[in-house]
Image: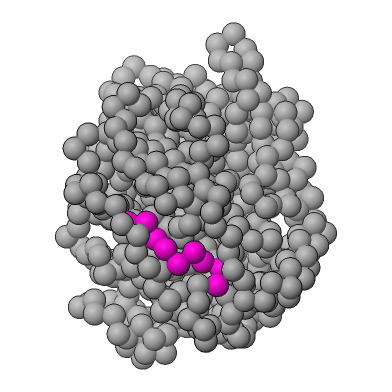
Amino acid sequence: MNTNNEYFGFTGKILKINLSKDLIQSISLDLDYVGAFLGGTGYACRYLINQLDKSTIPLSKENVIMIMNGPLTLTRAPSVSRFVICSKSPYTGLWGESNCGGTFGVELKKAGYDGIIVEGKSDSPIYIKITNDDVQIQEANYLWGMGIKKSRKNLKKISESFKVLCIGQAGENLVKYANVNAEGRSAGRTGMGAIMGSKNLKAILVKGNNFKPKLSNPEKFKESSKKAISHILNSSITQILRGMGTSAGVLGSYSVGDLPIKYWSKGKWDNISKISGENLNSKFLVKNKSCYGCSIGCGRIIKIDNKKYTIPLCEGPEYETIAGFGSMILNDDLESIAISNDMCNDYGLDTISTSGVISLLYHIHNQKEANLDGLKLKWGSSEPLKTLIRNIAFRKGIGDLLAEGSCETGKKFGLSEDEIATVNKLEVPYHDLRYCYGMALTYAFSPRGACHTTADSFKVLRHDFNIDFSELGIKKVLMNSNQKDIVRGTILLQDYRSIYSSLISCFFSNPPPSLMLELINFSMGYNYTIEDIKLMGERIFTLKRLFNNKMGLTAKEDYIPKILLEPLKEGPIKNRAPDFEKLKSSYYKLRDWNPKSGIPEKSKLCYLDLDNLKLNL
């Protein structure tokens, strides 16, 4: 803790709104929570773990949704403009967390708030308008039924300077994996858009100009920020991302066996170059896009113009979206992938879960007879995509089932859980754990269900990637290791990325941990060491585990379906698969979690200063 008990880096205020009571109030940021969990997801989880329990129905007025930025937001530090939306997920029933870049989090801080807590439910559609200290709840009946683009256009008529966070029709129709959009960027996973929809909350507008964060040591912080920016600019990863965005990963991932093909069943595909980042650049790219204060500029603004579908300017598809609507269904039509991405962004759908459930449907259709509203889901066919995406958003026909997700869809057609690529009901992102065995642990133990950003082992632990986290004890390892080195590396990375999700920093920005430590200390007034940061990261990660334990998660749910562990017969990772049971056993021991209950041992909770939580586990 800083000794002056000041809100260095923070505004010191959180906006709390109860929609059932039309109650608007400002509450103080809890400095004890900050000292133990920073901001972002750590702070949100510490708050929400006392508010929610196993009986809380996610899409009821009893659920609480929380938007948080971090202590470095609105400072000179690079790539820290992100914000998070957290709640109990309507999709998994567990910890819900969605991370978003852009400008909304920065504007919220300019208005004088570190976050927003929304409780209750409005009787009719509304939006929240925040102009510094002036906070209003306005009716939004005229916006209900609109897509995100049209909603934002209408709301900008109030004032172009407002930053707009809103949901589309998918959130209104309570699609379980509906997302939230903020100025073109998406908070994608775990269904935060459905929670907003369940509260009749269409949008939040914010405009601020009153606040600038106070830093503990401005001059030294400025120096550290310059060093961090220099490190990022000189990184080869930055050059790649600036050149092609995350779509640069398509060919690279394919070459090593990281890219999934034909619903996780193939290791080779001759048409991969047609959906590459190089092809996206040459055919559709108009310009790059950067989040606030970011030196990388990985976003793609593209243009599509054909007789059937014209998009003047829109966000281009990321790596995950290209894999989901491309290689997962053997679709080599890059234009259809870009259109699918734009439709998801406008309806407010998470592209990973949407493409995951659609690719599962292709898999089902090509295995057995199934009534799919007359659609012919032939491998490689892009024609059904637009219909399926639209029907999911409006819960029409087969889309009503797909809106519930892969597990419910697979169950409906007689598949076992071992045949469905989900972990804790969340679709697995598109990095094959048969390439990097550490990803089996990342997926199995991610607090929000299958998630590649909880620990990007496929990237950080690789010998040929110049991300150096050796100060944390994270060593480069063989991707196909079943030994404790990959378990230990993944655990340390999970803990460190928990720091990232609480600051909140983009995980494409990877200066040395000692430099990140300087930014924390010089902004917030702490004297943390590297060991302190490692401990705090473990505390934040463990807190999210406890949240899930409180919601009913046990060791039985620490599981990887067989479809992801079945060795492929071709390609770079031919005949490879992790020994998940061995890895899991090592993981429990190193984490000091009870292997029968899946709950951290009391000694571990004492070590992490989490033993004062009264969770009755």
Residue at image position (24%, 63%) is 52
Residue at image position (35%, 26%) is 143
Determine if the magenta segment contains residue 426.
no
State the image coordinates of residue 237 (x, y, percent, origin top left): 75, 55
State the image coordinates of residue 151 (x, y, percent, origin top left): 43, 28
Determine if the magenta segment contains residue 14.
yes
State the image coordinates of residue 264 (x, y, percent, origin top left): 50, 45
Residue at image position (63%, 47%) is 291
298 displayed left or right of 259: right
Residue at image position (54%, 54%) is 210
Q: Which residues are magenta?
A: 8-16
573 displayed left or right of 616: right
Q: Is residue 223 above or below residue 338?
A: below
56 or 390: nearer the viewer:
56
Way the structure is coloured: one colour
User: Can you tell which quarter of the image residue 360 is in?
Assistant: top left
Count all numbered tags in the image, as a single digit.
0
Seen from this angle, which residue lies furthest right? Answer: 234
